Image (cartoon, rainbow, N blue to C red):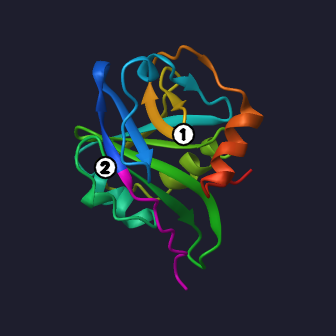
Amino acid sequence: FRRVLFRSILGTMGTLPGGVVSYCPATNNQPKGNDILKLRRIPYLAAARCTGEDAGAFLQSQLSADILALDDGDQTFATYCTPKGKVLGLLRVARQGPDYLVAARDTLLPGILRRLQMYVLRSRVMLAQDPEMHVLGAEGVHYSFGTQASSTADAGAWRAAELRAGIAWLD
């Protein structure tokens, strides 16, 4: 297999007030009212931004998900693999206007970005970790990207909830 395919969890996707991009897996409901205020920063995930007119096409050619099918506010899981199919990292990719936000384990994201940068070549793409952007979570394993959070999530409790939902980040 050239790439390991990762089937994303289907769910409701959209943009919350303040431009926070959100995703709610398999629950068919967005965080509402006070739940929006309860977005917590997930401490073991980091965010990066992919910009440029070739950003979508570049990520489409490098990741195992249909990135070009994402509409503004949509998100999906993807894997980044070696040419032989070894998974190097699980990513959460969100489209935000012409840009793409990428989340991964904080220990793996810098290496993934360095490796992706090697393949940019003549593509008009900029990849950079975004220290002001955080991966946020709400009850029920809802993912969001944003700059503000009400608090930091308990890492152990959040990882347990992810595992119950079938999500396992690589370390």
Task: Look at the numbered disc 1 and give the secondary structure of its residue.
Answer: loop
The residue nearer to you, when weighing 107 against 118, is: 107
Residue at point 42% right, 22% down? 36
The Cα atoms of the two marked residues, 1 and 2, are separated by 30 Å
Q: Inspect the image, locate mark 2, and give the three-letter code of the amino acid beneath it.
A: Ala
Magenta span: predominant SS is loop
Residue under numbered circle 2: 55
Count the marks: how many?
2
Q: Please provide the residue range marked out in magenta.
A: 1-11
- Residue 110 appears at what percent x and percent y? 62, 41
- Residue 98 appears at what percent x and percent y? 23, 41
In the image, 158: left or right of 116? Answer: right
- Residue 26 appears at what percent x and percent y? 44, 54
User: Can residue 60 be seen in this snapshot?
Assistant: yes
The residue nearer to you, when weighing 60 against 161, is: 161
Q: Is residue 11 above or below residue 43?
A: below
Task: Look at the numbered disc 2 and give the secondary structure of its residue.
Answer: helix
Q: Quadrant of residue 76?
A: bottom left
- Residue 104 appears at what percent x and percent y? 58, 45
Compare marks 1 and 2 and give the one earlier in the sequence: 2
The single residue placed furthest to the bottom in the displayed view is 1
Residue under numbered circle 1: 140
In the image, 149: left or right of 23? Answer: right
Q: Is residue 6 above or below residue 104?
A: below
In the image, 39: left or right of 50? Answer: right
